[in-house]
Image (cartoon, rainbow, N blue to C red):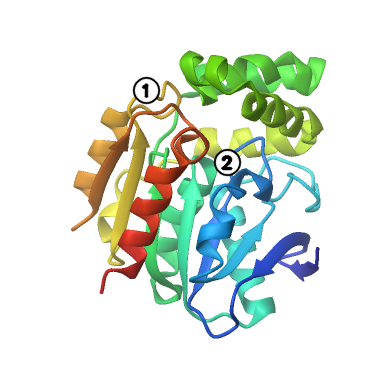
Amino acid sequence: MPFADANGLHIHYSLSGAETAPVLVLSNSLGTNFTMWDLQTPVLEKQFRLLRYDTRGHGRTGVTPGPYTIDQLGHDVLGLLDALDFEHVHFCGLSMGGMIGQWLGVHAPQRINRLVLCSTCPKIGTPETWNPRIEAIRKGGMNAVATTVVERWLTPEFRARAPQPAVALLGLLQATSPVGYAACCEAIRDADLRESIATIRAPVQVIMGARDPATPAADGRDMALRIPGARYVELDASHLCNVESPEQFNATLVGFLKTM
């Protein structure tokens, strides 16, 4: 897989699909890498020029000293788009990736055609929820939180019915840099986009999991109400709704991006 140097960072990315197709960027959640979109890739690369990338501190992208900010992670995306000479793109982000998407919709509206915000909110958690996790990681590494995090990502019923995705996601978490993970936790902790998202003018689709404890559906509904004209869909899933309900997720995503 190729790398690009942008915003002072060595960014790992994957580019697939027809060169003449519209560009769609996929942005990963906290504690994963761009392989979290594997269940979407075969469908999407048939219709889009698909750009997946590893967020700063994750996967094979560089790990720089923290703390990070959502502003910084947003500029990483803009730098990658500039390096690849992509002027206008669709953008889909989940959780942390969705916060990056909100930032792009507010601060780089000229670059975003359509925006899909999944399992995310403009304000996720509080310092009281993030700081203990950050401290645990710094003391005990990723194993200090990995099992608990995966249990929040997927419903118990799904994990019992299809254990392999949970095993694979646990491996992604355990392979994530503790430095990068903690720095991204700080970025999410400190971000509050609740007021600014009202300025987003790109067409927006919000996709939430009805059983998500990390970014509750009620917060997603509120986010959709704050963004002018945003559409809202709720899937019977937990946080990683793209993994737990891939068929419905893919249909919603493609249907929205193909709507003229």
Relative height, residue 144 to residue 251 (above, below): above
In the drawing, what numbered circle is on residue 211?
1
Q: Residue 47 location in percent, x, y?
A: 48, 71
The amino acid at mark 2 is Ser
Distance between the alpha carbons at the discs numbered 1 and 2: 17 Å
In the drawing, what numbered circle is on residue 29?
2
Q: Residue 124 location in percent, x, y?
A: 44, 32
In the drawing, what numbered circle is on residue 256?
none
Residue situated in front as seen by the camera: 67 or 219 = 219
Residue lying at 19% horizontally and 45% vertically, measured from the top left = 225
Residue lying at 75% horizontally and 61% vertically, measured from the top left = 11
Residue situated in front as seen by the camera: 120 or 43 = 43
Q: Residue 126 location in percent, x, y?
A: 46, 24
Select label 1 or label 2 by which is in front.
Answer: 1
Residue lying at 54% horizontally and 85% vertically, measured from the top left = 20
Residue situated in front as seen by the camera: 193 or 36 = 36
Relative height, residue 240 to residue 111 (above, below): above
Mark 2 element type: loop
